[in-house]
Image: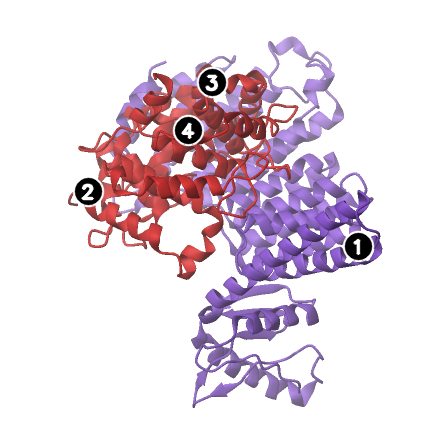
Amino acid sequence: MEEEKVSDSGGEADPSQLLYHLESILDSHPLINEVGFIHPSQFLSLAEEASTLVSASIETIAQPEDERVNTKLSGGNTPDMVFWNRDHKLGISTEYLLPLYKAAKNAFMAAVGRYNNAKMSRFHEESGEASVSGRSSSFKNFCAVDVMKHSRALLLLNSDFGTAWNYRKLMVSKEPHVANFMDELGFSKLVLSYSPKSECAWSHRRWVIKMISGKCLNLQEIVEKESDLVKLIAEKSKMNYRAWNHRCWLVSYMSSGQVIYEIISSRDWAGLNVADNSCFHYRSRLMLRMLEGSLTKQGPKTISSHDAEYYKILKEELDWNEMLIKRYIGREALWLYRRFLSIYWINQFVIDGADALPHSNQTPISTSEIKTFLDNELQLFYSCQVFSVNDFDDYRAQATFSATYMLWITRHFSQYPGSELIMELRPRDVQEVLEKYCPERSCLWNFLRTP
Amino acid sequence: MGELVADEHVKYILAVEKRKDDFESVVTEHLRINGAYWGLTTVDILGKLESVDQEEIVAWVMKCQHESGGFGGNIGHDPHLLYTLSAVQILALFDRISVLDIDKVSKYIVALQNEDGSFSGDIWGEIDTRFSYVAICCLSLLRCLDKINVEKAVNYIVSCKNLDGGFGCTPGAESHAGQIFCCVGALAITGSLHHVDKDLLGWWLCERQVKSGGLNGRPEKLPDVCYSWWVLSSLIIIDRVHWIDKEKLVRFILDCQDKENGGISDRPDDAVDVFHTYFGVAGLSLLEYPNLKAIDPAYALPVDVVNRIFFK
């Protein structure tokens, strides 16, 4: 079994050697899909884990060729390894990060300097100062390869080194083949594996997608994969604004069919992550996109069959949200999403006067539907007030959120026919809840209650 | 709870400025000019700006300027709008904007405005309302806001408004307190606050205050001292700051201090850094904590510095 020994005793390693080793590992293992920093003490447990796994597997299956284990131990049980590479995972010892980083940065900056000098000398040649452009062109390409190599190492140690990302963009722009752009998607994905909030890495992906959107036939497929990547990362990195922002950005590249597919397929994930406000915002973005250009484009008095379908999806979303609210007590994100859904439902589908649509029996919302909706919301509010004094904070939070939601409804629905029903909500009830559970915001409540 | 340990914070910041060789300072070297702005503004709010070497800092800032007119986060790094604003703000603190070739810097910024009024952060084209704020704030400090199409810039920001009253980084993006500060700040500087639904936005912003008194930046998140700046400055600009419990917030910020070694962290008992030290002290300044210089909620500079520029 091949063993990759990249080790050092006592932390006196030559930084440029460390960098060389890192880059060799990356070159010879293009399938590495995850990078992480590990404490020196973790090497020992990883080694033990691996040896158990290896001894078990030797008897059953042959070792895959790329499976290599770093298990050099010295001085009893003290591991002094720098890199750990197995099963397409690369671990870098935290003990060596500083010298490695400095070496990578110096190598990158030097490569950039050489690249820029080569560019200048080529410029002079083209102006007639020399005549060996063939040689200098290959030198420039050589420098470009160096820039790519060292920026890769640098960005795997510091994901927000903007200048290194910029030079990668520059190099790819000079050789704008789709394959080179796809490589950048792969590389930035690797960076996101250790730094899922890296703004530069997400921004790099958007740059790539913008660059290939005109020349790539399978853009829809790329957008789908991109959306899946966010889902994967959001699983490990909760409430990751940058990741979800990227997914929201993708929506403008989605076809209407894809938007509907996303709404339906991402519902279960949202149901399991009810505290992640970003995933509900993403759903609101999809809802808005779904209805964009449906009613508005065709004028308010024409209702297409699509609109009936969209209306149904929106109603289902309201029901699903209510189910979650009742199941997961006191979740702010769910109540805020309900605020969005309620005003979106009324703003999008109600049409001035109930006689606007004589030929349709599906949409828009009739006065009686508004009444049914408001009656439902009233019941929801009152159901949130029933709990014993021994119940925990979650129930008090639920009561507060339901009361503020009723303030929201009162504020946004009062202009519509059928809203007289809100008057059945005794203002005193809402006031009591808010004063009891959230007195510190009384200034705001007093303001919101005044019509 | 105790008091603000102002002297320790100044000592902490001056020590961080000099520290250049541990991993934390090395991996943040690409944004050192942001760090310098946070640190120096804090020192100024605490009334100790004379304790830094002005000449040395101004010379270093100027070395960060790129031939395009924009500034990088450090010497030899690519220019970006985010670093350009920090450079201008640092020079404003020292009353040294005159060392700039204003025409050159403003040309760099103006060239980054897009057809729809938005701004790219640099030549690579990422668009974000943060960059709109940076461009507007910077040009205003340089007294040449008229060089961009302000109307289009404002319309783009307004297009990023959500149904909850907040703003995101692009149209349709989730509301976030940091982005809200940028949008509201930019609208304030351009005299366009009438585009903001103050009651609706104020409602969303004050729901950021959690039981401990601290503010979060989005629903369901933990409180963090940095939002004492983003949320609070926005509430002040739209005149709704009386909707939150200010005393509780002061207590939360003070609880995040390292009283022995100086510095402020995101939450009580976490590790301190310059970023949170700035936002903590700036937040306390907005809350009118005694013996602090007043800070301007839109320009994020001490009020006397802003007045010096506009009422010279």
Residue furthest to the left in view is B2
In the structure shown, which secondary structural element does the residue marked by tag 3 occupy? loop
Please determine if labels 3 and 1 lie on a single subunit.
no
Residues packed near mark 1 inside 10 Å, few (<14), some (14 to 19) or many (20 plus) = some
Chain containing mark 3: B
In the image, B138 versus A424, the foreground residue is: B138
Which one is in front in this view, the residue at disc 1 or the one at disc 2? Answer: 1
CA distance separating discs 2 and 3: 35 Å
Q: Is residue B123 left or right of residue B133?
A: right
* Chain that is coloured purple in the picture: A
Q: Is residue B207 left or right of residue B119?
A: left
In the structure shown, which secondary structural element does the residue marked by tag 4 occupy? helix
Residue bearing the label numbered 4: B97
CB within 8 Å, label 2 to label 3: no
Splitting the image into 4 quarters, where does residue A253 fall? top right
Give the residue type that dot 3 points to. Answer: Thr
> Which quarter of the image is occupied by the C terminus of chain B?
top left
Residue bearing the label numbered 1: A137
CA distance separating discs 1 and 2: 61 Å
> Which quarter of the image is occupied by the N terminus of chain B?
top left
Give the residue type that dot 1 points to. Answer: Ser
Q: Is residue A25 left or right of residue B161?
A: right
Q: Is residue A436 left or right of residue A164?
A: left
In the image, B266 versus B137, the foreground residue is: B137
Which one is in front in this view, the residue at disc 3 or the one at disc 1? Answer: 1
Give the residue type that dot 2 points to. Answer: Leu
CA distance separating discs 4 and 2: 31 Å
CA distance separating discs 4 and 1: 43 Å
CA distance separating discs 3 and 1: 50 Å
Q: Position of residue A337 (x, y in %)?
A: 50, 35
In the figure, the shade used to draw chain B is red
Tell me the number on the disc at residue B190. 3
